[in-house]
Amino acid sequence: MRKLIVTVVCTWGISLLKAQSVWLPVGPQQAGGTYSTQFQHVFTALHNQAALAHISTVSAGVYAERRFMLEATSLYAMAVAIPTSSGTFGLSVQHFGFDAFKQQKLGLAYGRTLGSKVSIGIQADYLAASIRQYGGASTVTFEAGCLLHITPQLHAGIHAFNPAARQLYKAGAQDIPVVYSAGLGYEVSGSLLFSAEVIRETDRPMTTRVMGEYRIISQLSLQLGIATDPQLSGGGISFSWQSLRIFLSGSYHPQLGITPAAAIIWQLKKKETLL
């Protein structure tokens, strides 16, 4: 009986993932700053590793969200970015699920600029999934991205996750999608950013996101966003205090409900060259 219950819960969990893939980076409200140069932080690099090129100080962050207010679908992440004279290195860890069903992702990334108009980045990923009573599986894949700085205000980017179509083969584990995304960002000023992106995932309709961020003052900003398929709307607020930045955000799905999230980011104030 216990085995049957675990199987039902895990199957339901997988169906939720199809509405919002856990293999994608954390934080839909964090994605907008990817397509910019003035709104970058350590978590934007999880959406496109080319964003690492614009992180000029040592940064670290932790992130947590409870998808649809369920403990079994909680997501936690940690990210670190270390700039050097030859580019910026990043390390990230993500964990989703609970004891009966969980997914994990470990990423080692590198990003740098190619002149003043182009930024590139790549990340090696270790992915693992397990279901109690059925065991687990793991594999290695990669993702890569590019950002084009068309003008000082207009930015575009593309990103590919798992383009080699690597899969988890052991029974009970989830297949890994191939995901492509492209986006545009327009910095109206140093205080206002509008961005939009499209995401194409294996065996799913295309998703569109439209996002905006407004800095009321340097220490306080607001984020808003909407998405289609899955249909999501959400917003957030961030506070800065000395070397810390705190994000509080949430999104809403018409059928599945509310997903609250929070992030804390620390970064050095002074630009340093470590190597």
Image: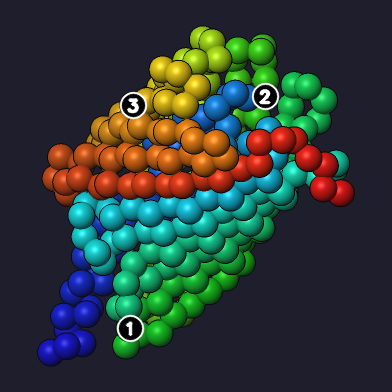
Residue furthest out toward the front? 242
Residue in the foreground of this view, choosing between 10 and 242: 242
* Secondary element at tag 3: strand
Residue in the foreground of this view, choosing between 55 and 132: 55
Is 105 situated above or below 233? Answer: below
Q: How far is mark 2 from mark 1, CA to CA?
A: 44 Å
According to the picture, the residue beneath numbered tag 2 turns out to be 148
Kindly tell me whether residue 194 is visible in this rendering: no
Q: Position of residue 244 (x, y in %)?
A: 52, 41
Is 191 situated above or below 263? Answer: above
> Residue at 86% of width from left, 49% of height from top?
275
In which quadrant of the rendered image does the N terminus lie? bottom left
Q: How far is mark 3 from mark 2, CA to CA?
A: 24 Å
Q: How far is mark 3 from mark 1, CA to CA?
A: 38 Å
Mark 3 Cα within 10 Å, few/some/many (few <14, many 20+)? many
Q: Position of residue 128 (x, y in %)?
A: 49, 71
Circle nearer the N terminus (3, 1): 1
Q: Position of residue 20 (x, y in %)?
A: 33, 49
Q: Is residue 160 left or right of residue 136?
A: right
Disc number at residue 132? 1
**Mark whose residue sits in front, 3 or 2:** 3
According to the picture, the residue beneath numbered tag 3 turns out to be 224
> Residue at 27% of width from left, 39% of height from top?
251
Kindly tell me whether residue 109 is visible in this rendering: yes
